[in-house]
Image (spheres, rainbow, N blue to C red):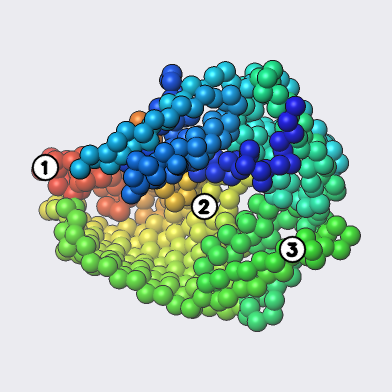
Amino acid sequence: MLLLDNILKSGRIRLLSLLLFLWSFPAFASQVEVRVKGDYPGLQENAEAFIGKVEGRSASNLRRYASTASSQASKALRALGYYSPVVDWQVEEGESEKPARLILNITPGDPVRINSRTVDIRGAAASDSRFTDDLPIHPAKGDVLNHGDYTNLKNTLRTRAQRRGYFDGQLATHTLEVDPKALEADIDLAFDSGDRYRLGEVTFEEGHWFETRLLHEFVTFEPGEPYHADEIAKLNSDLLGSGYFSGVDIDAVPGNAENGEIPVRVAVTRRDPRSIATGLGFSTDVGPRFRGTWREHWVNPMGHKRGAETELSGLRQSLSTWYELPLDPPMTDSFRLTAGYQREDIENVKSELLTLGQQWQHQLDDGWLQVLSVRWEGERFNIGDDEKGTSTLLLPGVAYSKLHADSPLDPSRGYRLQIDVSGAHRAALSSVDILHVNALAKGLFTLAGKHRFLTRFQFGGVATNQFEDVPPSLRFFGGGDQSVRGYGYQTLSPENDNG
């Protein structure tokens, strides 16, 4: 029997670390050609990776190198469970334009298989189902021995311990016993986790300028909770995502723990207070257009923000501004005041719209984002030659939206759902009774690993007892790139007797 786990530095198992890079080696032209009898592409690739690229050698030099190449090939096969390969070699003499070649003919033989696998979790982690569940299935009993799988199993235990706060954990037993004659291998792992560390009090270094109360609202855990690396990562992400900071440095080192509790120290660097963005573009809907945004990322130590946006095109000109107050938690909840002006002249519809409003945004426990709003709209409009009017509306509303994606940066699957409902009544500072509903669903999915499809479905409706008094901003029009293609932008709408 060979005890392999503690002799990794010997020539016998030095190949383990190299296995991590097994699949990254491309095929290459070399003076050494590996031929494996049978259908074993993995064995051939691993042998080629171990031997490496061999160039510029004469036939005599290749003969001297043959024993080294054969030894490397044997190690490569052993890493994948083939402990008794037969390696024969021959050298083909080179010609004027064709270099000499060393050919290795390998017969793998029978593989070593896993006879038993024991993984014993001791300490506090033994009762932590998130630690003990879903360990790698391989290597499993009956599998062909793969030293990479064995190393991966050990690394999973170590990595999981670090992520879940078992910083004193260690492999008390880690043996892989191989009997090449019996073609059997036995795995025995015992991980002693020790106690789980806890998260301590969060403190922010001086000089951050913001109210400490605001910063502590970004902390989603309480002192004394079991440590998890994801909590630290989330705090870092939320602080950076707030728009207040250009840098965040969190110190939560186990070496600073007292009585098993790790103090969390946070240093933040304020970003520049203001930013301006401008852009010129062209769309088939509105033609050439200019967009500009101005944002003040922090107005005062309480974290208030404000900004303005403008869009200028031949069909639409708009200017809007807003002022936002963070709520608790500031990552998702806020109160915003808005004001805006918009002028449109599209086909035979002209309008001027002035809006004032407020929005309260709150994320629900199930992940849906809820927005409660009240806005006042004053609009003057002309529709064709017949409909002219002025509307005044006080519109309370509610909106729900949800976004899901498998990756925040480059998603391959995901969806977005949104529904908005608002209404007005003549008894409440409004010139017309109206109920306005708009729903949107978008989906992204990928086929065959590289073909992405984006679907979009939208519907809406207006209920009123005086449709001619409904302003254009609350009506629905079709046509354009994002609607019914082949028709001009917002040229489709209900027609009156005059068309």
Query: Of callouts 1 and 2, which one flags the residue occurring earlier in the amino acid sequence?
Result: 2
- Residue at the location (72% across, 50% down)? 162
> Mark 3 highlights which residue?
253
> Where's residue 331, x and y in %?
58, 59
Quadrant of residue 277 within the rendered picture: bottom left
- Residue at the location (49% across, 62% down)? 358
Q: Kindly check if marks 2 and 3 are in contact, taking CB atoms under 8 A apart as contact.
A: no
Q: Gap between marks 2 and 3, in whole Å?
A: 39 Å
Image quarter of the N terminus: top right
Helix, strand or loop under label 2 = strand
Crowding at dot 2, Cα within 10 Å, few <14 / some 14-19 / many 20+, comes out as many
Name the front one of labels 1 and 2: 2
In terms of depth relative to the viewer, which is nearer, 128 or 290? 128
Image quarter of the C terminus: top left
Name the front one of labels 1 and 3: 3
Looking at the image, the residue that sits furthest to the left is: 498
Is 47 situated above or below 322?
A: above
> Mark 1 highlights which residue?
499
Query: Of callouts 1 and 3, which one flags the residue occurring earlier in the amino acid sequence?
Result: 3
- Residue at the location (63% across, 45% down)? 365
Crowding at dot 1, Cα within 10 Å, few <14 / some 14-19 / many 20+, comes out as few
Name the front one of labels 2 and 3: 3
Q: Gap between marks 1 and 2, in whole Å?
A: 38 Å
Helix, strand or loop under label 3 = loop
Tell me the amino acid under the disc marked 1. Answer: Gly
Question: Does 2 sit left or right of 407 as displayed?
Answer: right
Q: Which mark is residue 371?
A: 2
